[in-house]
Image (cartoon, rainbow, N blue to C red):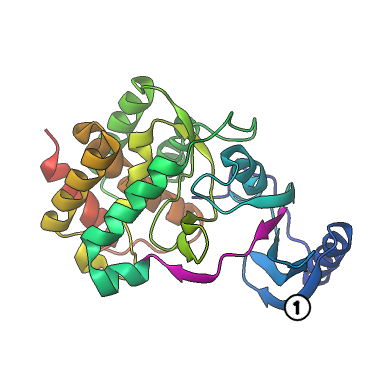
Amino acid sequence: MTPNCFPNSDLPRSQHSSRSQQLAADWRVDVGDVLDTDSSEISFGHRDGQAVVLKVVKQPNDEWHAGAVLDAFDGRGIVRVLEHTPGAMLLERIEPGTALVDVVRRDGDDAATTILAQVIATMSPGEPPPTAPTAADLGRGFARYRAAGDTRIPSRLVDKAERLYLDLCASQRRPRLLHADLQHYNVLLDNQRGWLAIDPKGVVGEVEYEIGAAMRNPIDLPELFTSRRVITSRLDRFCSILDLDRERVLAWSFSQSVLSVTWGFEDGHQIAIDDVSLRLAATLESMLR
């Protein structure tokens, strides 16, 4: 998801470290190892004997208010947040932290899809934080892409995906707070609590919207998730376990596949002729009624 909806900020690395150190002191964290990524500084440590993770986001983006999103889910099917402030959160540590993508490789896609559906079923949110965008807010990416003048995504596909996306937004049933990036790299195994979601983006929409991210993942196994057989099996399993409207899941997945490419374009990524999300979109489009 593109961070363009957020104010610009690009603090020097020393300021990120300084903020991490200050928050560690404020939240009484004894820090051990520190991992520095492009987007965050992640400190592993303990507080009152509990293993914790302190995550400080480097600049406002779609994770800036993740702490408030986690707070709304209150640990139901998702990692618990112990403290949070815009751009930073203190989390329980998930151990061993095996990613769901390993289940795909070991036990197959059906097993992983069942786990994803069960996590979604468990994630019962409270009231969404006021900072959470709606699905309609995110749909503005279509118009921004068109305004940028790029033509690498066929205009016919952009127009159809946008039209379908807006129709879905206008006809949603029971919108609620969603994770909005619930896929195989964002579900980890905890020894005590089982499979848990991490790194929510937080979007208000109907549950059928939530399936879109899973349908275009694991990103490093494109031949798997672009297979019509796998798509059909996933749709059957998600809709059966979660009692979802199959046509709406299919339509959301198609339109989000195209929209995700526009977000990548805004983030400076190249759009290849054989872009995997567009390959998925072509298959999904052929399955639409």
Q: Taking 197 as reference, is 259 above or below it? A: above
Q: Going 23% across and 54% down the picture, which residue do you hit?
A: 280
- The x, y position of residue 116, in whole percent, is 35, 52
Whether 90 is among the magenta residues is yes
The percent position of residue 139, horizontal first and vertical second, equals: 43, 35
Pick the quarter of the image with the C terminus.
top left
**Callout 1 amino acid:** Gly
Which class describes the residues within 10 Å of circle 1: few (<14), some (14-19), or many (20+)? few
Q: Is residue 189 left or right of residue 4?
A: left
Determine which quarter of the picture holds residue 159: top left
User: Which residue is label 1 attached to?
Assistant: 32
* Quadrant in the rendering for residue 30: bottom right
Q: Position of residue 109 (x, y in %)?
A: 23, 62
Position above or below: 226 against 281: below
- The answer to which of 47 and 110 lies nearer the viewer is 47
- Report the residue at 21% width, 47% height from top: 237
Is 60 positioned to the left or the right of 30 in the image?
left
Number of numbered discs visible in the structure rendering: 1
Residue 187 or 3: which is nearer the viewer? 187
Answer yes or no: is residue 124 visible: yes
Q: Residue at x 41, y 22 (%)?
A: 174
Residue 111 lies, in percent from the top left, at 25, 60
Residues drawn in magenta: 88-100
Residue 149 in magenta?
no
Provide the major secondary structure of the magenta segment. strand
* Residue 162, quarter of the rendered image: top left
Decide which of 113, 136 is in the foreground and name it: 113
Q: Is residue 218 above or below residue 36?
A: above
Q: Secondary structure at mark 1?
A: strand
Question: Residue at coordinates 65% horizontally, 45% vertically from top-left?
Answer: 65
